[in-house]
Amino acid sequence: MRITGYRTLTTVQEWARPVGDANGVFADGATPVPVVLVDTDEGVTGVGLGSHHGIAGVFPAIEGEDPRGVAALYDRMLRHVFKAGHGGAVFATVGALDTALWDIKAQLADEPLWRFLGGRDRVVPAYASGLDIGLGDDDLAATYGVYAERGLRSAKLKGGLDVEADRRRLELVRDVLAGAGAARPGLMLDANETWSRKQAVRHVRELERTVDLAWIEEPVRRWDAEGMAVVQRGVRAAVATGENLTGLEQYRPLLRAGAVDVVQTAAVGGITHFLRVAALAHAHDLPVSPIGNVPVGLLHAATAVPNHLVSELQDLWPPVGVTADLDIEDGAFVLGDSPGLGLTVAEGTVAALGLRPGPADPAGPGVRPERAGLRLLAGPETFRSPAPPPPAATEAPPAGPGAAATDDRPRTEPRRT
């Protein structure tokens, strides 16, 4: 069996609400989701959700190879791009290809990936994560009420710009979850690297006067091991980080400094990366927690590691044109029995969207604000999304995620196929 080619598509996640973090908000409630399809000479195709960036330079590392040699091919891809660096979007491209190869390998074995990797239980504990900084209180309560109906009893909110707003919103969600039956709801706050070291400690300590935080996520810059350690020693909450790290070498300084309590990896990093990070964390007696929208590959892998803590559940529905063989029941993902990842991509539906990956929107959340990390007080600082420029009179508005969010396609429930 040989790898013969790849195809790229871009679909969209329709949130039906504004989504974002301290770095900005997608006001139209739509975010692009790149898809990579890897083909073989025996007609088996693997699916990876992740970046396309630099794929023409990465793919030659695996072209013509047997897709079953996944771990070796992962390292081969990293070696192929080492001069330019494998960080950022290129690392996510490697991860998408890696995920597609694992999908192929499990399909060939005619087993769901969770079983193929050695998992015993298809149930993966989850927490709710609404990407909710752009929501008012009523919408916030309604959003987490929907999660609570699915049995979610822990929630991670976006914040970091206003300590009193964070307190009010955390307490509101706590009450929603408690009202749904949670004896002691788990609460987390994600600052998305927006604080300085001292501001992080001041902000979290102030919150902890009235709110029991399970963890604080990315309080300072991802690579600042000393800063993370300052926060870790200065607050009661656990410190969670790692979703934006791109290789084991980037975790080592954090672990040496005792700066992390919950080791995270992003779904776009790929399955091989997750398995290696989980083993490294386990060697330090630390739990691991996957991050990301549609983290299907890491959910399968999480069943096979001894130190999985909990996985992030963002939207309850998959992207447009994608179906997933999984359920969400009693506060957990429940993986199905379809061979491989259990993902199906309706290529015609996705292609009809006409989307292509584009540059980051200056309004965020992909662009770091000027004052991030340069504030000491605990707020308030309200994010204001600039109004988009009007389209030129002689041109139609450019195609993009916002246009796709307004169509009449039915949303596909993430039920088993």
Image: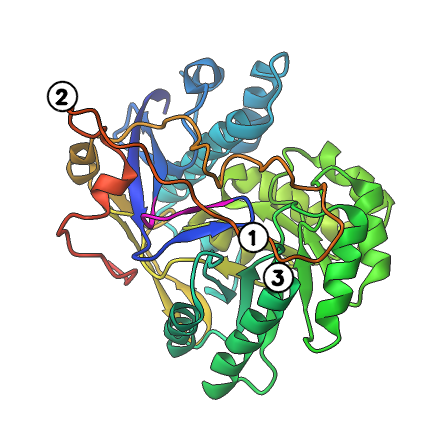
Q: Give the range drawn in magenta.
A: 24-30
Residue type, numbered disc 2: Thr
**Taking 63 as reference, is 319 left or right?**
left
Which residue position is annotated with label 3? 189
Rendered image: mark on residue 394: 2
Rendered image: mark on residue 316: none
**Taking 184 as reference, is 89 left or right?**
left
Of helix, strand and loop, which one carries label 2? loop
Mark 2, mark 1: which one is toward the viewer? 2
Residue 344 percent coordinates (x, y): 26, 46
Residue situated in front as seen by the camera: 286 or 336: 286
Rendered image: mark on residue 290: 1
Mark 3, mark 2: which one is toward the viewer? 2
Mark 3 Cα-neighbour bin, 10 Å: few <14, some 14–19, many ≥20: many
Residue type, numbered disc 1: Pro
Q: Are marks 1 and 3 in contact (CB under 8 Å)?
A: no
The quadrant holding residue 185 is: bottom right
Mark 1, mark 3: which one is toward the viewer? 3
- Upstream in the sequence, badge 1 or badge 3? 3
